[in-house]
Amino acid sequence: MNVIEVNGLSKAYKGFQLKDISFRIESGYITGLIGQNGAGKSTLIRLLLQLIRPDRGEIKLFGLDPSMHEKEIKERIGFVLDESHFYEHLTAMEMKRVTAPFYKRWNEASFLQYMDRFELPLRKKIKEYSKGMKMKLSLAFALSHEAELLILDEPTAGLDPVVRREVIDLLQEFIQDEGRSVLLSTHITTDLDAVADYILFLQRGQLIFHHSMEEIQETYSIVRGGTMHIAEAKRRFIGCRETSIGFEGLAKNAAELTRVLPGANVSPATLEDIMYYTARGGARHGQSIG
Amino acid sequence: MVNLLVKDLIVMKRNIITVIPFGFIFIALTQLNVTMSITVIAYMLVAQLLYQEDKSRTDIFVNCLPVLRKELVRSKYAGMVLLTLLAFLIVFAVSLITRIVVPDLMTSFSFEQALGAMMTVLGFGAVIYPLSIVLSPMIIRYASVIFMLLYVILFTTVQYVIAIPGSPLSGISSTEFLLAASAAVAALYIVSYFISKALYERKSL
């Protein structure tokens, strides 16, 4: 079953446009949404959460049209936003009293368990929480109403490595139950290396690719070579930079490239490499290179 | 919608608790001026209800919950009525206590005055809430002050005109004037609700 289905989605702002985005996310996987700051990740997430309306295109969540089944869909979504939007003068317990009645499947025991696990004081005002604590509180709310889909916008931004790891571990636990899915937006791509099954890559409002991690590892490589092949590399690579001893760049189908660039060294590309070289070279992922 | 009203009451709990002793002080300072007391107390509560989402953009959080935008708007309009009634009850209770504790003090609690005050605050909410959907919080704060000033000028002018013998309004009794004004505010409130609903459903958060 497709948990998220997006067709021809567009949204324009002054100076920014999300252009004709289409993809499908199947149930049961963690999908990482990556892209530079301003690539359109938050806009896409806000469209999925019905916080903004699209100019064109269609969104379906759990196979349902949000304009007809908004409440039913939101019941099934756990959300974590990029900033704290809590009533910060309330304590966590008061915030729970405010939030819980909206969910038919609110699980009080589960909430208290998460609060205990995250060592979050129930009677402390949220404004006195640290950034990491607020993020954990968001996760406790998102995980306490038996959500089937978690939508997280930059949940690890600004967190220390220990908390980041805890968040990632928690997502892995969440996905263990069949039929649960996660859409996780981040520009800290190393967070995704261990957990993501699929990657959606946005660049300047356009969807560059939606691939499985295996496909990405098979398709993209970092190629390094000597100065004599720089011109050729620049022409054929997605993105390329000159180094003191030659060049380094991101390429698709590197095995073929090594035939025209003899002596080049090929290594697997990380998500960070893909983002970096795409930003340098423009979006040429769709072109046949090699 | 009940969940949203309960949410607003929990979020405003401290404001409501603060307003009660303030109410006592204010009522004493104005020598039990019912109109002034209800207007100020209700204004403080209603303004808080309308502005509370500005801090930390809590409207974003609320809109991610299983709730429809039209329900959010409806709850704000119902909340304004509820808080205005609460202000009325606070002033009524203080008047009653004062009569019991200090029987010699001349106090008069007029329901006409109370109605006038409540209608003033609801009129304020009816104008300010739809504006707050489309304008920035800073502009809305200025607009609120301008609204209250215009209200005082208009109210004083009408009172003055009624008092002039032979003026077109001189034949109108204060009760008739109050009923007409209340009907106008009620109509404004209903129109305002539909405008707010249309604006909020289109708003980007």
Image (cartoon, rainbow, N blue to C red):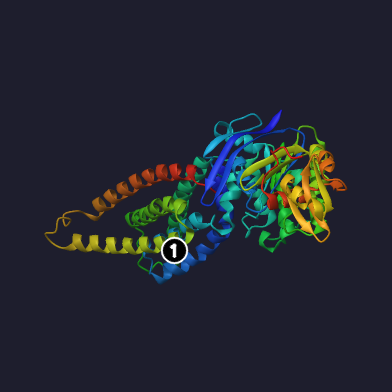
The reply to whether residue A89 is in sight is yes
Q: Is B114 displayed left or right of B93 in the figure?
A: left
The reply to whether residue A118 is in sight is no
In the foreground, A2 or A259 = A259
Q: Is B172 displayed left or right of B3 in the figure?
A: left
x and y percentages locating residue B65 in the rendered image: 61, 43
x and y percentages locating residue B178 in the rendered image: 28, 52
Classify mark 1: residues with Cα within 10 Å, few (<14), some (14-19) or many (20+): few
x and y percentages locating residue B15 in the rendered image: 54, 61
In the foreground, B98 or B178 = B178
- Disc 1 is placed on an element classified as helix
The amino acid sitting under disc 1 is: Ile
Compared with B167, A64 (above or below) is above
x and y percentages locating residue A134 in the rendered image: 71, 56
- Give the residue displayed 62% in from the left and 60% down from the top: A89
- Give the residue displayed 44% in from the left and 52% down from the top: B129
Q: Which residue is mark 1?
A: B100
In the foreground, B190 or B167 = B190
**Chain letter belonging to callout 1:** B
